[in-house]
Amino acid sequence: MKSDFFKDVYDVVKLIPKGRVTSYGAIAKYLGIARSARVVGWAMNNSHLDMTIPAHRVVNRNGLLTGKHHFSKENSMINLLLNEGVTVIDNKVVDFDEIFWNPLKELEL
DNA sequence: GTGCTGACTGCAG
DNA sequence: ACTGCAGCCAGCA
């Protein structure tokens, strides 16, 4: 039995529009655990239980694909992002600020 | 039950 | 500007 908080993370991540990316901190803050962004990443680690979760759209606040290493292939995360129109160079999201999807702003608005 | 680690972030030096 | 430390929550040894 997973914590409800995990489900919330999955739900928010699933709501991330195609071609957009968000950060762990943004999700954490949206859930009310801004200081616990690591837990969000932990939830993503368990996201493999739910293939519907686009974890590749979740990056750190620098736009760096820190979690790419946890994917089957390190190129998978990048490939998925590139497939969605997200330019990724050197494991980093280009124009991260422009394609950044803020749940606090999008969902709360 | 206690302790460490982890896909992070923010503040301090 | 870059590096280092502390904090938060959950899972595993």
Image (cartoon, coloured by chain):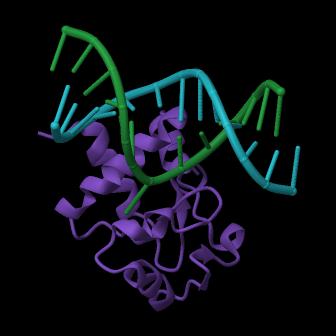
Chain colours: A purple, B green, C cyan
User: Can residue A66 be seen from the camera position used here?
Assistant: yes
* As drawn, A54 above or below B4: below
Count of marks overlaid on the render? 0
Q: Nearer the viewer, residue A45 or A98?
A: A45
Residue occupying image coordinates x 33% and y 80%: A73
Q: Nearer the viewer, residue A20 or A35?
A: A35
Residue occupying image coordinates x 34% and y 66%: A70
Q: Nearer the viewer, residue A84 or C9?
A: C9
Question: To which quarter of the image does residue B1 belong?
Answer: top left
Residue C13: image location, x then y, percent: 16, 37
Residue A1: image location, x then y, percent: 11, 39
* As drawn, C9 above or below A18: above
Q: Residue pushed farthest left?
A: A1
**Residue C7 shown left or right of residue A76 in the figure:** right
Q: Nearer the viewer, residue A94 or A4?
A: A94
* As drawn, A7 above or below A57: above
**Residue A53 shown left or right of residue A50 in the figure:** right
Residue C7: image location, x then y, percent: 54, 22
**Residue B3 shown left or right of residue C11 in the figure:** right
**Residue A54 shown left or right of residue A78 in the figure:** left
* As drawn, A55 above or below A10: below
Residue occupying image coordinates x 47% and y 72%: A17
Residue occupying image coordinates x 53% and y 40%: A29
Residue A38: image location, x then y, percent: 45, 43
User: Can residue A108 be seen from the camera position used here?
Assistant: no
Question: To which quarter of the image does residue A62 belong?
Answer: bottom right
